Image (cartoon, rainbow, N blue to C red):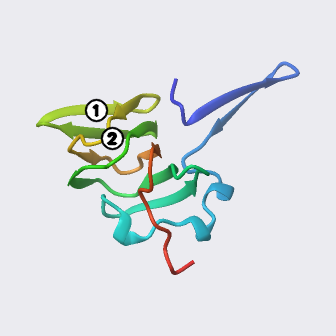
Amino acid sequence: MNPALWHLRVQGVTILCVMNDFPEFMKNPVNRIATSNQATPSVEGYVFDGAEGSQMAFWTCRQTASSAEHVHDFDEYLSVVQGCYTLIIHGARIPVKAGEEYFLPRGLPHSGEVLAGTRTIHAFGGHRADRSSDA
């Protein structure tokens, strides 16, 4: 089942909802990630902070793009909500599709390729992104 779809059965009626974007409450302009903090061009992202310094980021890629190889000083967890994000680790291409997840331990060099329309949720064990000053 496509995770961008959900079904609800109410009093014998099945309701189908298609979500192609994150809900508006998750896209408050004050949480918008600064363009300079985006590893992938043409991506729209929003960040939320944990009390201990971790962060959650929600990204929507409007066009097919690639990210340069980079390394984090903290662990990263990635879940693809819609579309496909291909991780590239030591030359190996690992497609992570809708409904799939991947764990990247700290210090692991990685890059990626994302298809237009892909939405991802990332959890970082440290500070990954700054907010835009435009908000």
Tell me residue 85's x, y (percent).
33, 41
Q: Nearer the viewer, residue 5 or 84?
A: 84
The residue carrying mark 2 is: 85
Q: Position of residue 76 (x, y in %)?
A: 39, 41
Taking the view exactly as shown, the residue that stands out farthest to the right is: 11
Establish if 45 lies above or below 111.
below
Query: What residue type is disc 1 on?
Result: Pro
Q: Are marks 1 and 2 in contact (CB under 8 Å)?
A: yes
Question: Is 83 drawn above or below residue 48 in the view shown?
Answer: above
In this rendered view, identify the residue nearer to me: 86 or 134: 134
Horizontal side of 38 relative to 132 (left or right) equals left
Quarter holding residue 67: bottom left
As drawn, which residue projects farthest toward the left? 91
Q: Secondary structure at mark 1?
A: strand
Q: Residues within 10 Å of mark 2 (few under 14, many from 20)?
A: many
Q: Mark 2 or mark 1, which is nearer the start of the sequence?
A: 2
Q: Position of residue 66 (x, y in %)?
A: 24, 53
- Residue shown at 18%/34% (left/top)? 93
Q: Identify the residue at image location x=52%, y=59%.
A: 46
Distance of label 1 from label 2 (alpha carbons): 6 Å
Q: Nearer the viewer, residue 94 or 128?
A: 128
Residue lying at 41% horizontally and 49% vertically, measured from the top left: 117
Secondary structure, mark 2, is strand
* Residue under pointer 1: 95
Q: Quadrant of the C terminus?
A: bottom right
